[in-house]
Image (cartoon, rainbow, N blue to C red):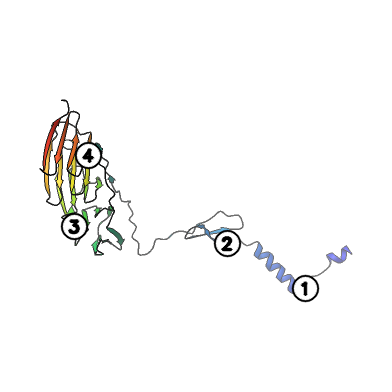
Amino acid sequence: MLRWLFTFQFPKSLSFALGLTLSISFFPVLVANPDLLESDTYYYDTVGQNLNRPPQRPHPNLHVPNVPVKHGVTVFSNIPTDKTAYPYLQTTINFVEAHFAFKAFLSDGTEVSYSTRGEHVRYSKCNGEICIIVSQKNVLGVSNTSTEWEKGHIFGEERYEVAMGHRAALVASDRKLYLYNGYTNHWDTISLEQEILRGFANLYDKVAIITSRRILVVDLPSEGQFEQNLLLRGIYQFEMRDGFINFYSSDKLWMFRHLTEAFEEVDLTD
């Protein structure tokens, strides 16, 4: 009986099919599993190989610079304590980044475009009624009262700090302050000669700027600038109100009144 089992011959066709099946079973099988990573396909070798990701080739129309761009743009933080009670201010302007362009959409539906060809955008943001862009060679602003992006030129500085208000924005380098006025759609340049920026705030149509040497209040609609020398004192706290702005030093208070557009000095040691 056993001799009969070992001497049994398979039909030729069945032998061929069995041999083909065994050959395929020992050949590495690649199984696609697209669920391993979103939008990518990984391939698994069932013979025991590790997960292998196919080499990524850049899109032919995508320019990838060989040297990484150093941004050098940070968000400014006040050194004096800002006690201003800011109301809720809705952002009513927006932009989208298109192919070599930024398209701003104003509150009335107007579309305002700016070509960024030849520029590396380092910072961009919208807040309240304004949007700004900082590139390696320009600062740009647009507001709901604009007809185009307003350009201001910067001159080779590598590091910037950016502060956004509702109607005004500040781009500060080590040497200059670039103030964007959302009312007039205009950039003002303020020189920093042996000064350090300490504070910035924007409430409605007024801007407060504090440096290591002075206080500067800007009325946005008229573009008027009002200055107070700090007399070697430092400001540790300030507060913007509807009718006035208070700047507190250790022994003095400087109050800027909107009605008179002048500073009043109060001695806090009395």
Check disc 3: other Cα within 10 Å, few if <14, some if 14-19, many if 20+.
Answer: some
For disc 3, the marked residue is: 150
Callout 3 touching callout 1 (CB < 8 Å): no
Please state the horizontal and vertical placement of residue 182, each as a whole percent of the image. Answer: 19, 54
For disc 1, the marked residue is: 11
Amino acid residing under circle 1:
Pro
Check disc 2: other Cα within 10 Å, few if <14, some if 14-19, many if 20+.
Answer: few
Dot 2 or dot 1, earlier in sequence:
1
For disc 2, the marked residue is: 31
Is residue 224 found left or right of 137 in the rendered image? left
Q: Which quarter of the picture shows residue 215?
A: top left
Dot 4 or dot 2, earlier in sequence:
2
Q: Which quarter of the picture shows residue 238?
A: top left
Q: Is residue 34 visible?
A: yes
Amino acid residing under circle 2:
Val
Which numbered disc covers residue 239? 4
Amino acid residing under circle 3:
Glu
